[in-house]
Image (spheres, rainbow, N blue to C red):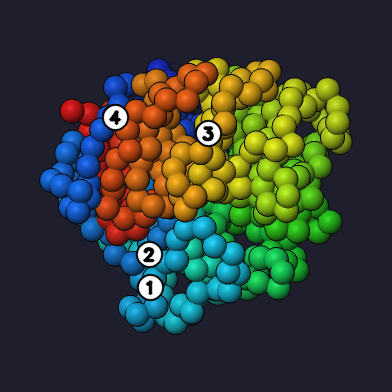
Amino acid sequence: MWLRGAAGLALVENGWSADWPLFRGEGYGGVATGKLPVEWNCDPAAGPDKNIQWKTAVPGLGHASPIILGDRIYLITAESEDAGKRSLKLGLYGDIKPADDNGVQTWLLLCLDRKTGREIYRKPFRKQKPGSVRHTMATHANSTLASDGKYLVACLGADGLYCFDKSGKVLWQVELGPMRLGMYGADWGYSSAAAIAKDRVFIVCDEVKEPFFASYDLRTGKPGFRVSRKGVSERSWSTPFVLTQAGKSQVILNGYPWIVSYDAFTGEELWRLASGGDIPVPTPFVAGDLIYITNGHGGKTPVYAIRQTAKGNITGTEHVAWSAEQGGAYLSTPVVYGGNIYLVNFNGVIRCFDAVTGKKHFEQRLGGNSLAVAASLVAGDDKVYVPTQDGDMIVLAAGNTFQQLAKNAMGAGLMATPAIADGVLYVRTASQMVAVRSS
């Protein structure tokens, strides 16, 4: 059957396997089944390893999250020829200057054995100066791979769109041209992942001068439609979300000043919603009968729950099941689990609402004033996992009241979102991949 709501749709016999084929797994939902870990340690400074199945060093810099196909893990990274400039500045700050890291980069596709962490291959697929700069908190390899189970697709913005087979061979590539993504005259680089539906690839490049949404043939890279987003979105770092229902597919794009849905086969606009936060990063997703979208910055951090029957300009209409002007997320994609939606803002404040009615259950600061969160939430086994830039994975009990179960040291900052398969958390830190198991 074709599964609804997955950016990478897969044909399977009895539902989803243990694969985690794109950012946050099926439909970008971020929810896993099975027993999951609560407590562990991966920081030598905090003591010996605890409940760590394996850990493997990852070269270069990359915030791309791992994806899982069968017994293999795939991710991308970028190595700078100037090792002295391969630094990240994490945490809470307002400096908008880009990183001084514009020398020659080598982009690598990495493949690891899921059970042991052994590196199966590393395949360089691009070597040159980057087509855009990066934020001091970002990298030149921010975008998570997307897969339909056969092909792997990486979108790097000004550094190209690539399709690989699972052996790491480049099947095709498309140069997307120079682009700037930022505001206040700054340029912060690209982060949107590609999306896949059946035989098509979808990308969004909301760059300053010529923002566009486009499709390509998955097997050949042949261009499909290209839709200008001038006047629709001034900027976005979000990933397209493909929703398929009753044989029809729409692609929903977070953006500012408009959140917009397009027909997946024609590029025709289906509906739009006036946005609130002027730096849209979180990815839309579906849970139950509702589409959830949030964004932040500019004074507002709205969250919207939208009915799947939406069409036309839905701002202020019954097509919005509920919304909150404050309470959403700036960078992190929320998770819906156990009837609630959990959202954590960049400053470490987590909020929980009823996913259907919008009733707020709690609001809580996770740590000190310096704690920052950029990676997205995942959940399962009655737990919600919050990766922090401080290098801790905070584990919360799912429910209507705030309860912190554990704070687990990872030894390095967390900017990538974990993947989950067969009860194991696969976590990319700033320096390595780590497999965390239950005790």
Assign the C terminus to one quadrant of the image: top left
Label 1 vs label 2: CA separation? Answer: 7 Å
Which of the two discs, 1 and 3, labels the residue nearer the N terminus? 1
Q: What is the crowding at mark 2: few (fewer than 14 residues within 10 Å), some, or many (at least 20)?
A: many
Q: Are marks 2 and 4 in contact (CB under 8 Å)?
A: no
Label 3 vs label 4: CA separation? Answer: 20 Å
In the depicted view, which residue is nearer to us: 374 or 269?
A: 374
Quadrant of residue 212 in the image?
Answer: bottom right
Q: Position of residue 386 (x, y in %)?
A: 43, 38
In the depicted view, which residue is nearer to us: 233 or 41?
A: 41
Asked if residue 68 is positioned above or below residue 304 in the image, the reply reads below
**Label 3, on which residue?**
364
Which of the two discs, 3 and 4, labels the residue nearer the N terminus? 4
Q: Secondary structure at mark 3?
A: strand
Which residue lies at the image location 58% right of the left edge and 69% below the top edge? 95
Label 4 vs label 1, nearer the camera:
4
Q: Position of residue 179 (x, y in %)?
A: 64, 70
Q: Secondary structure at mark 2?
A: loop
Q: Are marks 3 and 4 in contact (CB under 8 Å)?
A: no
Give the label on residue 86, or none: 1
In the depicted view, which residue is nearer to us: 66 or 198?
A: 66
Label 2 vs label 3: CA separation? Answer: 32 Å
Asked if residue 418 is positioned above or below residue 81 in the image, the reply reads above
Q: The residue under label 4 is which amino acid type?
A: Val
Which of the two discs, 2 and 3, labels the residue nearer the N terminus? 2
In the depicted view, which residue is nearer to us: 393 or 403?
A: 403
Label 4 vs label 1: CA separation? Answer: 33 Å
Give the label on residue 38, or none: 4
**Label 2, on which residue?**
61
